[in-house]
Image: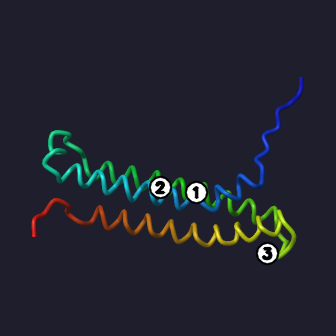
Amino acid sequence: MSRLQWTIRPELLQWVGLFGAAIGWTAQHITGFGVTVAKCGAGGSAWHLDQTAWQVTLIVVGLLLILVAEAAAVTVLVRTWGVEEDDAPPLGRQHFFAMAAATGNVLFFVMVLLSGIGTLASTPCQQA
């Protein structure tokens, strides 16, 4: 009986690492805004949304997506260790994107964390 070996293509890891955190932050940000608008709007009052539960869930899911993206970027970095960014493709390109992704993912992690803390610390639906 043959064993199945699961191998993930480096190109897939490269793109997950590069775009995964941006997609995670965008989903958290847009959905969180939508939940706040639904909670505070007249049309959403019948839904009885728990703002805190939704925001915490969105923060956790967003951070998990970013951690997956960071793991993918670090995996590509480890696989291309010793390769320079200007080396021949595909390894040079993969190393370059992985370096950019590993740095950018940290920034997206902080953005989700800070926006989540700000959302939980503020009181929505107040008239000025």
Q: Earlier in the sequence, mark 2 or mark 1?
A: 1
Q: Quadrant of residue 74?
A: bottom right
Separation of marks 2 and 1 at Cα, in angstroms: 10 Å
Separation of marks 3 and 2 at Cα, in angstroms: 29 Å
Q: Earlier in the sequence, mark 1 or mark 3?
A: 1
- On the image, the x and y values in percent for residue 116 come to 37, 62
- On the image, the x and y values in percent for residue 25 come to 47, 60
Amino acid carrying mark 2 in the image: Gly
Q: Earlier in the sequence, mark 3 or mark 2?
A: 2
Residue contact between numbered discs 2 and 1, judged by CB atoms under 8 Å: no
- On the image, the x and y values in percent for residue 81 come to 82, 69
Local secondary structure at mark 1: helix
Q: Which mark is residue 85?
A: 3
* Residue identifier under label 1: 20
Residue contact between numbered discs 1 and 3, judged by CB atoms under 8 Å: no
Amino acid carrying mark 3 in the image: Glu
x 13%, y 63%: residue: 126
Pick the front one: 84 or 82: 84
For this view, does 39 lie left or right of residue 42? right
Q: Quadrant of residue 85?
A: bottom right
Amino acid carrying mark 1 in the image: Gly
- Number of callouts: 3
- On the image, the x and y values in percent for residue 96 come to 74, 71
Q: Which mark is residue 31?
A: none
Q: In which quarter of the image is the N terminus?
A: top right
The crowd level at tag 2 (other Cα within 10 Å; few <14, some 14-19, many 20+) is many
Local secondary structure at mark 3: loop
x 18%, y 53%: residue: 40
Number of the front mark, 2 or 1: 1
Q: Which mark is residue 62?
A: 2
The image shows residue 25, relative to residue 82, as above or below, that is above
For this view, does 41 lie left or right of residue 67? left
